[in-house]
Amino acid sequence: MEPESTESTVTTCYRHPKVESHVRCTRCDRYICPDCMREAAVGHQCVECVKEGARSVRQARTVVGGRISATPLVTSVLIGLNILAYVAEVVRPEILDRFAMLGARLVGPDGAYYVYAAGYPSDFHAEGVVAGQWDRLLTSGFLHSPPTEGTFGLLHIVMNMLSLWQLGRVVEPMLGRARYLALYLLSMLGGSVLILLLTDPHTETVGASGAIFGLGAAYYVLARRVGADMRSVNRFMAFLLLWLLLSAGLTSWQGHLGGLLTGAAVTLAYAYVPRGPRQALVQAAACVGVLLVLAMVAFAKVSELTGAGMGQ
């Protein structure tokens, strides 16, 4: 009998048929060449299996349900916007007059400013939130005192941006970008609404302090939520509250307090809503609720201003 001929079977990479391969993907069991190998916990995997695994792995979440991000991108963007707005207002000072927080004032036919009163003469016109310029409630939070004006001048934006960076790079990763941005804007709005409510309506106010105080409140609430060592956190909050008191005669304490209270309310909703499929929905509803309360307070104040003096 003639000996049976044996022929060795050559195995090749499934992606590169001309390349001989003897290693299998530990997930799909196909042969892969060195160019297609990817290190795995055990053995090697092919390119497609690595991509599929990345899609199927559950995204890590923060304590409040936000997506984890190591880079404080939103904080960096906000600082950039504040700096751009500052450069713009230095180049064109009229930007302050149009976009600063202002409840109400009158502009006379001579171009001078006058204290607002309902039923003003036809040759006057109103400016401020009372005149429908609702955007001032937010735009004022991106403006700061001109370099040679105000109590602090250039230091106003410098101190605010340093504070925003210090707080933002801690709070943003704990919340995730979307929740962090909502917190920032709502805190800014809360500060402006309390200014509208408690400040002389003809007074112009600018600054990101309301939003920054909101971040300070968030830092405190989140630290308690995760069980952090509260000694340094308590010292920070004591300094923040002390600054709120000491700066009352120099800055807008109404804006600071409004931002602080709004930031605390929003972060409490973020931090203590039970985890589950409806967590994000409940948190969003809480933010909408805060927004509606602020809107109602602002509308009530504007209604009071526009109705004042009608019987005179």
Image (spheres, rainbow, N blue to C red):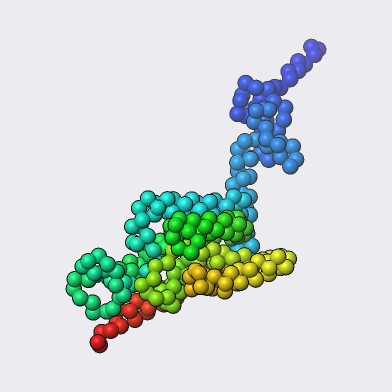
Q: Position of residue 196 (x, y in %)?
A: 41, 74
Identified at 79% across, 11% down, the residue is 2
Asked if residue 250 shows in the view, the reply is: yes
Rendered-image quadrant of the C terminus: bottom left
The percent position of residue 262, horizontal first and vertical second, equals 52, 71
Which residue of the protein is positioned furthest toward the front in this rendering? 148
Residue furthest to the left in view is 122
The answer to which of 159 and 197 lies nearer the viewer is 159
Give above or below for 191 relative to 309: above
**Which quadrant of the view contains residue 277?**
bottom right
84 relative to 74 in the view: left or right: left
Q: Quadrant of the N terminus?
A: top right
Left or right: 305 in relation to 81: left
Residue 145 vs residue 302: left or right?
right
Residue farthest toward the top in the current orientation of the protein: 2
Q: Quadrant of residue 150?
A: bottom left
Image coordinates for residue 269, horizontal then vertical, percent: 56, 71
The answer to which of 220 and 62 lies nearer the viewer is 220
Give the vertical position of 112 relative to 83 (above or below).
below
Query: Could you tell me which residue is drawn at 70 percent across and 33 percent down?
Result: 24
Q: Which residue is rendered at x = 21% and y = 67% of the image?
A: 109
Is residue 278 at least partly visible in the picture? no
Q: Residue at x 51, y 73 (%)?
A: 249
Hey, which quadrant is residue 309 in on the image? bottom left
- Asked whether 67 or 175 is in front, the reply is 175
The number of callouts visible is 0
Q: Position of residue 20 (x, y in %)?
A: 68, 22
Above or below 1: residue 40: below
